[in-house]
Amino acid sequence: MDKVVISLGGSVLVPDMSDAQYVRKLAWLLSEMAKEYRICIVCGGGRIARYYISMGRELDFTKEELDSLGIAVTRLNATVLLLALGEEAVPAMPRNEEEAAQLMEEGGMIVMGGTTPGHTTDAVAAKVAELAKAKRIVNATSVEAAYSADPKRFHDAERYSTMTLKQLFNLVDKGVHEAGPSNVFDRLGAEIAMKAGIPIYIVNGRDLEEMEKAIKGRDVKGTIAEP
Ligand code: UTP
């Protein structure tokens, strides 16, 4: 069975208004997909992580302490999905990428959050994908695709339907050095995927048809970054 690692954005799972119906449908889709693929879902922190991190900053917490808050929230979000999946998922949540890759080898759906201070869950997903020799990474995000610039600010921004992993890396590398909108994928994650030659499918995670196509490696409305 091919392995697929999904980086599920916190804002996808926990949008501004709670959306239990979405979580229910997502859990159903993932359960269906698990019949054909070995899946690991890495959940992001979203606005709840940002809430705690900004509060922690006002309390003068160190960078490591702020990251520990972020990691705790990603694991909280992962717990929501784990509970929604019920018996479909492996109940123990891995604490690091090695454990996740090992559990993927044994079968069963894996749900987890962040692992290492200073990283993001995109990087965690890429690392698990590398260790588990996954067929692809699905970045389930709140944007439709990768663009050459922020489409909200630049109306002539180019939308990519396909690109190379190197192009994606260069794009997000540029994003890290320029202040502006958050990147479509984490720089370290893009680097890991590029070096390991693992395709990244960037899709709107709220669109479950897109999610299904991305998991299956079919054409998507979003972006496919390939070796
Ligand atoms: P996210 O992966 O959701 O961060 O983790 P992000 O990419 O900044 O968030 P989005 O995608 O824009 O919503 C949330 C926070 O948790 C900590 C970091 O502080 C991160 O900003 N974190 C997460 C870690 O320190 N290590 C991890 O492995 C994961």
Image (cartoon, helix red, strand yellow):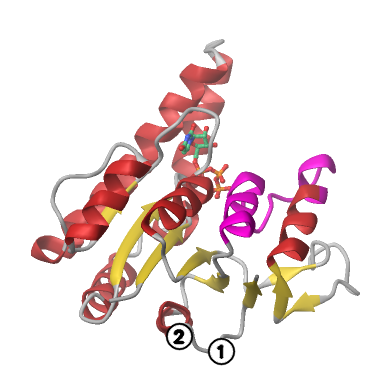
Question: Which quadrant, please, contains the C terminus?
Answer: bottom right
SS type, badge 2? helix
Q: Is residue 204 magenta?
A: no
Task: Decide which of 17, 110 is in the foreground and name it.
Answer: 110
User: What kind of residue is marked 1?
Assistant: Asp
Task: Decide which of 145, 168 is in the foreground and name it.
Answer: 168
User: What kind of residue is marked 2?
Assistant: Lys
Could you say where residue 134 lies in the image, as x and y percent from the top left? 41, 65
In the picture shown, does residue 18 fall above or below 226?
Answer: above
Could you say where residue 53 lies in the image, as x and y percent from the top left? 52, 28
**Looking at the image, which residue sits at the far left?**
87
Q: Is residue 81 visible?
A: no
Q: Residue at x 44, y 41 (%)?
A: 48
Q: Which residue is mark 2?
A: 213
Residues shaded magenta: 174-196
Q: Residue at x 28, y 73 (%)?
A: 30
Task: Decide which of 116, 84 is in the foreground and name it.
Answer: 116
Q: Residue at x 45, y 31 (%)?
A: 116
Gap between marks 1 and 2 measured at Cα: 7 Å
- Pointer 1 with pointer 2, Cβ within 8 A: yes
Q: Is residue 177 magenta?
A: yes
Q: Is residue 169 visible?
A: yes
Question: Which quadrant, please, contains the N terminus?
Answer: bottom left
In this picture, residue 92 sits left or right of residue 223: left
Q: Which residue is mark 1?
A: 219
Could you say where residue 90 lies in the image, as x and y percent from the top left? 15, 55
SS type, badge 1? loop
